[in-house]
Amino acid sequence: MLTGKAAVVTGSTSGIGLGIAEALARNGAAVMLNGLGPAGEIERLRSDLAQRHGVPVEFHAADMTRPDEIRDLIATAERRFGRVDVLVNNAGIQHVDPIEAFPAERWDAVIAINLSAAFHAVAAALPGMRARGWGRIVNIASAHGLVASAGKAAYVAAKHGLVGLTKVVGLETAGSGITCNAVCPGWVLTPLVERQIESRAAERGVSIEAARRDLLGEKQPSGQFVTPAQIGESVIFLCSEAAAQMTGAVLAIDGGWTAQ
Ligand code: NAD
């Protein structure tokens, strides 16, 4: 379905972003990976994806706190692939603390990576998409883009902001062949969430398994984790012709979290 198209997925060396990159490559898109991690491990991911799906896969190490590097990520993808048709703003970090104890430096980092990075990437990718009259921008927000939880001031503010940015980009591109939508996952078992499960287990003196059940039970009525593959497939749907009139919208994939 995406043969001949090229995609950039920020934060795709792990978790949800990797699941999205996998789905895009499987559907024929060239993919520019991005994210942190050991060079050898990233190269293994890159060549494995390229070989299994027979598509060009490259890696750019842009730090999502650095606007110049984000813009270079898009420019490099355009140079290498001749185009950027699909942009998935996925990179994200978490920090949990009550607001009085929330380190200002962590607030700045969460807002930069989870929100401002998407602004810079969209601004850099839009001119090419407009010139070709086709584009798909998908912002990976969160259930926390729709509702809040205590202890997550920066994350909830950034994700609500990302949902707002999605609506503005949807309006500014309406009718141009470009769409911009947000996907709002509930709990997905990735390193970002595993760290939260580990601190919960330590704080409460319970096993990892008990902390995991407790985390799901508190918010996610299905009692099951969403998978990176399911988020990947939602991005494929948003890239499809069926979703051509869907823009500025929010797709909650959260096991019922935000239905409560
Ligand atoms: P993860 O920790 O597995 O992956 C995060 C990715 O972002 C990694 O590739 C990491 O290298 C990259 N990254 C982090 N800081 C970066 C930086 N400064 N520059 C470039 N890349 C950077 O986490 P995940 O759970 O896969 O999260 C992916 C996205 O999904 C995030 O935006 C997160 O907020 C969102 N999300 C996750 C969940 C969940 O339950 N896991 C739920 C809702 C939303």
Image (cartoon, helix red, strand yellow):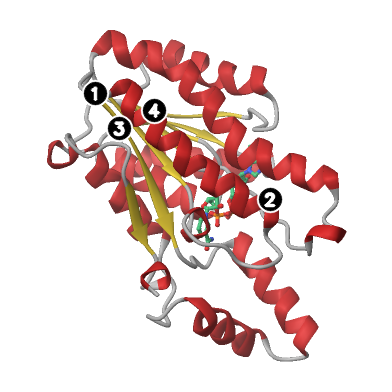
The residue at which mark 2 appears reads as 154
The answer to which of marks 2 and 1 sits earlier in the sequence is 1
Any part of residue 120 in sight: yes
Disc 4 marks a residue whose amino acid type is Val
The residue at which mark 1 appears reads as 4
Q: CA distance from mark 3 to mark 1?
A: 6 Å
Residue at point 59% right, 23% down?
Answer: 70
Rendered-image quadrant of the C terminus: bottom left
Does 98 appear above or below 182?
below
Q: CA distance from mark 1 to mark 4?
A: 24 Å
Residue 113 left/right relative to 120: right
Disc 3 marks a residue whose amino acid type is Ala
Q: CA distance from mark 2 to mark 4?
A: 22 Å
The answer to which of marks 3 and 4 sits earlier in the sequence is 3
Disc 1 marks a residue whose amino acid type is Gly
Residue 58 left/right relative to 232: right
Q: Please name which of the two marks, 1 or 4, marks the residue nearer to the observer.
A: 4
Q: Quadrant of residue 30?
A: top left
Task: Mark 4: give few (<14), some (14-19) or many (20+) Cα within 10 Å.
Answer: many
The residue at which mark 3 appears reads as 29
Disc 2 marks a residue whose amino acid type is Ala
Residue 226 left/right relative to 215: left
Count of numbered marks: 4
The answer to which of marks 2 and 4 sits earlier in the sequence is 2
Q: Position of residue 182 (x, y in %)?
A: 39, 44
Does 210 appear above or below 81?
below
Q: CA distance from mark 2 to mark 1?
A: 38 Å
SS assignment at label 2: helix
Does 176 appear above or below 86?
above
Q: Position of residue 27 (x, y in %)?
A: 24, 41
Any part of residue 7 in sight: no
